[in-house]
Amino acid sequence: MMGAAAAGALVIGIPLAGMLLREKSGMERMQEKLARYEALQEQYSYMSVFVLTQDVTAGDELTASMLAERRVQSVEDLSLAQPLSADDLVGKRVKVSLKKGAALGSDIVYEGEEVAQDERRAELTGLYLPKTLRENEFVDVRIVFPNGEDYLVVKHKRVYRLIKDEEGAVTAAELRLLEEELLRYQAAVVDTKTYEDTRLYALQYTGDFQAAARAYYPVSRAVFALLQWDPNIAELFLVDSEQERRRILESHLEQFLRERPPAAKTSTESDASAAGTAAEPDPYADGSQQAGALEEKEPLTLYTGLPEEP
């Protein structure tokens, strides 16, 4: 009986010993993996960042509901990094359009002014844009007349979007204009149609840190009156001297047009001559005749309404 019991115990103990050996080996392997994982974790640095919970467009103001905190790790040393808190982001505006889940940093947000009630998105065409212009840069919109006088029409505007045609050429720029700025821009557009060789163009700022310039373009008498009773203008500051500056501008242009020598034939006139068609004589080739004709005609700047943007 004792021999039988010993034999039975031996039969039962062999698989049990094998199981214990496998368990021990498995525990040793797990401990090795845990040690390697802990060693690897010691190589990482951790910090908290805020990510977006929704898509945003350049210029949008951040709210608390747009932010979610996430813990990230990096093999780089993050001890010098300055993590942002929710208070550092709420109320700020984003410089560029971002997708949901994008991490936010101090270089992506800026301290923006509150959006005015009369601010609107405007796609400006017929505006000369520098070839080096990029989205989110700041520009001034200026107008230059044929006599060389150059005026600032709209100051310090961010280019939110460059609009391109099917071939990739930039055809327009999206800016955000206040009601007063829109009227002043439209007045400048009319001037480009009234005075030949007048051009509207955008001029880039060197960096975001530069202070905004001051606009000083004098609008026409009709637009000046409109500015005073337009109910959509939230804030307005006008001075009577603006109309005096406008009178001086127009008188300078009239004198320039009287004294300017006859222009060379245009390509259209040259083509007409080549085809055997005689060009019409210029009835105002003589300066005195032109001056008299200008006095008899309607004023050079006559506005009956604001035209649509070309």
Image: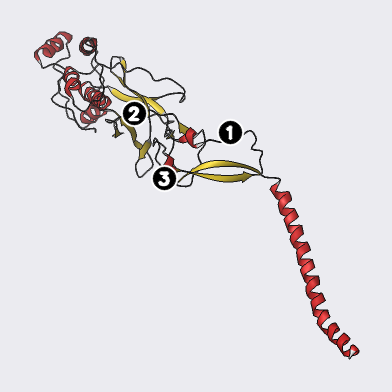
SS class, disc 3: loop
State if disc 3 and disc 1 touch (CB < 8 Å): no
Give the vertical position of 49 relative to 146 (above or below).
below
Q: Residue at x 43, y 24 (%)?
A: 205
Identify the image quadrant of residue 65.
Answer: top left
Label 1 is placed on what type of residue?
Gln
The crowd level at tag 2 (other Cα within 10 Å; few <14, some 14-19, many 20+) is: some
Q: Which residue is mark 1?
A: 82
Q: Is 281 situated left or right of 90 in this image?
A: left
Label 2 is placed on what type of residue?
Tyr
Looking at the rendering, in which quadrant would you find the N terminus? bottom right
SS class, disc 1: loop
Report x, y in % for residue 244: 21, 9
- How many marks on residues? 3
Whole-angstrom CA distance, mark 3 to mark 2, is 31 Å
Whole-angstrom CA distance, mark 1 to mark 3, is 24 Å
Give the vertical position of 4 relative to 239 (above or below).
below
Q: Which residue is mark 3?
A: 55
Report x, y in % for residue 108: 48, 35
- Sequence order check, earlier mark of 1 and 3: 3
